[in-house]
Amino acid sequence: MSNCKLVNDKVEKLIASLTPELQELTDRGAKIISDGGLVAFPTETVYGLGANALSESAVAEIYKTKGRPSDNPLILHVSSIDMAEKLVKWNEKAEKLAEAFWPGALSLVLPARDIVPSKTRGGLATAAVRMPNNAIALALIKKSSLPIAAPSANISGRPSPTEASIVTSEIGDKIPLVIDGGQTIFGVESTVIDITTERVVLLRAGGVSKEEIEATLGEKVFAPQTESEVRRSPGTRYRHYAPLVPLFLVEQDEEIAESKKWFWIGTKEARFSLTKPLAEKICLDYNEYARELFKTLREAEKVGAEIIYAEKPTEVGIGLALQDRLVRAASKR
Ligand code: TXA
Ligand code: MG
């Protein structure tokens, strides 16, 4: 278990790095969580809306606050591998992946233990666990000594928040505490994989790439194919990340004549003609594209864009997660 110790040391160090002000805020947050309340906090992916994962009533508040369908399960955030093993039936693949990627943007779906309330797992026999790579998130878990169930801190169907101010304006009046940890690093949510069966299934592309997981396990990771595999991924049943402005995917060098007020996001300068863009985002790479995506969708709404064009990313690395979010957000032509 020497690697377990490495992970634990990393967690300790991260928590110790918090400023006195954030130590105090996470003390307060941990108390709220222990008392059954909700706290919004940053992770390295997006902001989460957290509550005690082991309390049915606390978890019910999450669903209510977000307006989330009750059959869409929550991820349980942990601060140690020991904590994860108390929640799910751990296996060899989990051990390998946790050693390689935790703390990090990878959620592992495993058979749930009875201690996890049915509400937390949306009625499923499995549960998703992840150790976030963010000092504030880890401090909340560690200080409350509780696994924290946390979906993204947005109203269901809206883009995930990547800054505290977005959480505050969307649901701030409904919860006692939003902890500001600045802009999140990845901007897209964690990768969710099902490792309950022989075949490893990618349920949601995210911060950790499919290629990295395949290299670590030494085996292929599959998209859900059989009916039972598709059923294991409740999150994909719902329309996500819907911007209020229609969004269309375009090729990097596509020329479009558009008379509407358009908004562009991508890695290269938009080559649209006729009208000037309302705002222009010229990103350097996919990491930045991912980091800015959800915020840009909201920005386009705010400035009154009539149409958003987004460059279609290739499926390499974080590009796969980016493409997944964009396709879900896109309007059909
Ligand atoms: O990066 C993230 O994962 C963020 C931060 C806050 O950690 N959380 C997040 O949670 O994105 P949420 O609730 O927005 O998305 C959780 C996804 C959903 O697609 C859900 O269906 C899936 O994980 N999920 C959770 N438990 C599952 C399970 N037992 N089986 C299959 N899918 C599961
Ligand atoms: Mg979400």
Image (tube, helix red, strand yellow):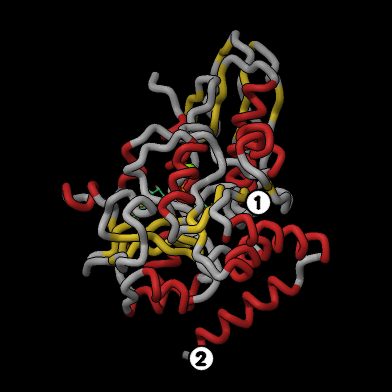
The crowding category of the residue bearing disc 1, from other C-alpha atoms within 10 Å (few below 14, some 14 to 19, many at least 20), is many
Quadrant of residue 193 in the image?
A: bottom left
> Label 1 amino acid?
Thr
Q: Is mark 2 within 8 Å of ligand 1?
A: no
Residue furthest to the left in view is 227
- Quadrant showing the C terminus: top left
- Left or right, 59 with respect to 286, comes to left
| Secondary structure beneath label 2 | helix
**Residue 134 location in percent, x, y?**
64, 63
Instruction: Identify the residue shown where x is 46% and y is 79%.
Output: 82
- Toward the viewer: 304 or 215? 304
- Left or right, 308 with respect to 121, comes to right
Quick one: label 2 or label 1, which is nearer the N terminus?
2
Residue furthest to the top in view is 259
- Toward the viewer: 86 or 230? 86
- Left or right, 301 with respect to 223, comes to right
Instruction: Identify the residue shown where x is 16% and y is 47%.
Output: 227
Residue named by callout 2? 2
Would you place residue 137 above or below residue 7 in this image?
A: above
Residue named by callout 1? 184
Would you place residue 28 above or below residue 327 in this image?
A: below
Instruction: Identify the residue shown where x is 66% and y is 44%.
Output: 176
- Toward the viewer: 259 or 92? 92
Residue furthest to the bottom in view is 2
How far is mark 2 from mark 1, CA to CA?
30 Å
The crowding category of the residue bearing disc 2, from other C-alpha atoms within 10 Å (few below 14, some 14 to 19, many at least 20), is few
> Label 2 amino acid?
Ser
Query: Could one spot residue 20 in this view of the protein?
Result: yes
